Image: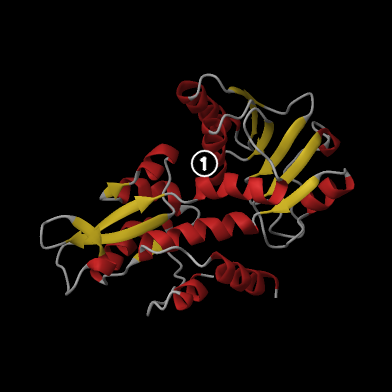
């Protein structure tokens, strides 16, 4: 997806994958600065860890408390920090500027794939880890009517609920399953990646027949067991491929300073993931 986007923009860049253990993240980011990389993306579990490792935080990273996109910057002739793409020569001092492109991608995908406006909606959110926390905060900020938070470790859900109550007191938030209907069930756990994973939603405590739509952040397989069950229950369904597309497109825009070729990136992403 990123390489297709960079090629379409005529950029002589390459996007590569590196496996980095959490305890080596700080070292890896420092090495990326030394190598004068344009930027990096971070995935689980690095998004929360990286917040404390940034030299500067964009408002998006401050608001959602997670970093998934890093842009490396250096000072120009006037002493102002600029993206490395705009700097000539080899600067000595490079800083890491952290952004979050996940949050906007979530609501954009919900609107595009499910025609869902979260304002005033009742939403059951499964998972309160990195992705779940970002989703919960974004849904609250966008005016969700009521959020129900479910997590394997209840303490994490309680912590996110407390943060929402403090920052958006008009949004009702409950830890646990709803008794009535909801407009959306959103899976922010990794359950569904493996064929033998249990459903992230406890069918004995909540029936998918009570949901209007189900969104699963897992995108491979294209139809997770949760989405298969949701289809049987008559729900509108979508997986996380569109969210992945839009967070990546925004990252490319931050690195390049140009509008991302979303159509090209979408085609490359679908071919790569689904063949």
213 or 150: nearer the eye?
213
Q: Position of residue 170 (x, y in %)?
A: 54, 19
210 to the left or right of 243: right
Determine the residue located farthest toward the top in the rendered image: 170
Q: Position of residue 262 (x, y in %)?
A: 55, 65
Question: Colour scheme used in the picture?
Answer: secondary structure
Q: Position of residue 141 (x, y in %)?
A: 51, 32
Determine the residue located farthest toward the left in the rendered image: 78
Q: Is residue 188 visible?
A: yes
Q: Is residue 46 above or below residue 17?
A: above
Give the residue at x 41% y 37%: 63
17 to the left or right of 113: left
Secondary element type, mark 1: helix
229 to the left or right of 247: right
Q: Is residue 45 above or below residue 83?
A: above
How many residues crowd around disc 1 within 10 Å: few (fewer than 14), some, or many (20 or more)?
many
Determine the residue located farthest toward the front in the rendered image: 259
Q: Is residue 198 visible?
A: no
Q: How many marks?
A: 1
Q: Position of residue 245 (x, y in %)?
A: 57, 60
Q: Quadrant of the C terminus?
A: bottom right
Label 1, on which residue?
A: 134
Give the residue at x 57% y 29%: 143
Q: Is residue 32 above or below residue 150?
A: below
78 or 1: nearer the eye?
78
133 to the left or right of 113: left
Q: Quadrant of the N terminus?
A: bottom right
């Amino acid at each position: 997806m990123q390489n297709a986007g960079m090629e379409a923009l005529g950029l002589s860049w390459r996007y590569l994958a590196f496996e980095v253990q959490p305890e080596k993240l700080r070292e890896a980011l420092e090495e990326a600065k030394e190598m004068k990389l344009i930027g990096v993306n971070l995935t689980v579990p690095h998004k929360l860890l990286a917040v404390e490792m940034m030299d500067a935080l964009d408002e998006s990273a401050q608001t959602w408390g997670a970093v998934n996109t890093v842009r490396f910057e250096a000072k120009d002739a006037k002493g102002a920090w600029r993206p490395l793409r705009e700097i000539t020569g080899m600067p000595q001092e490079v800083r890491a500027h952290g952004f979050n492109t996940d949050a906007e991608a979530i609501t954009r995908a919900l609107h595009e794939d499910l025609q869902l406006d979260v304002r005033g909606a009742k939403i059951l959110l499964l998972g309160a880890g990195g992705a779940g926390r970002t989703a919960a905060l974004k849904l609250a900020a966008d005016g969700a009517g009521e959020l129900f938070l479910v997590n394997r470790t209840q303490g994490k859900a309680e912590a996110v609920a407390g943060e929402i109550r403090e920052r958006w007191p008009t949004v009702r938030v409950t830890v646990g399953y709803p008794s009535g209907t909801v407009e959306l069930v959103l899976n922010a756990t990794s359950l569904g990646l493996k064929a033998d994973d249990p459903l992230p939603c406890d069918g004995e405590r909540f029936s998918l027949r009570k949901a209007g739509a189900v969104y699963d952040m897992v995108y491979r397989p294209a139809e997770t067991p949760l989405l298969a069950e949701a289809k049987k229950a008559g729900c509108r369904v979508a997986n996380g491929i569109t969210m992945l597309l839009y967070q990546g497109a925004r990252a490319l825009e931050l690195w390049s300073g140009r509008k991302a070729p979303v159509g090209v990136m979408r085609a490359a992403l679908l071919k790569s993931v689904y063949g």
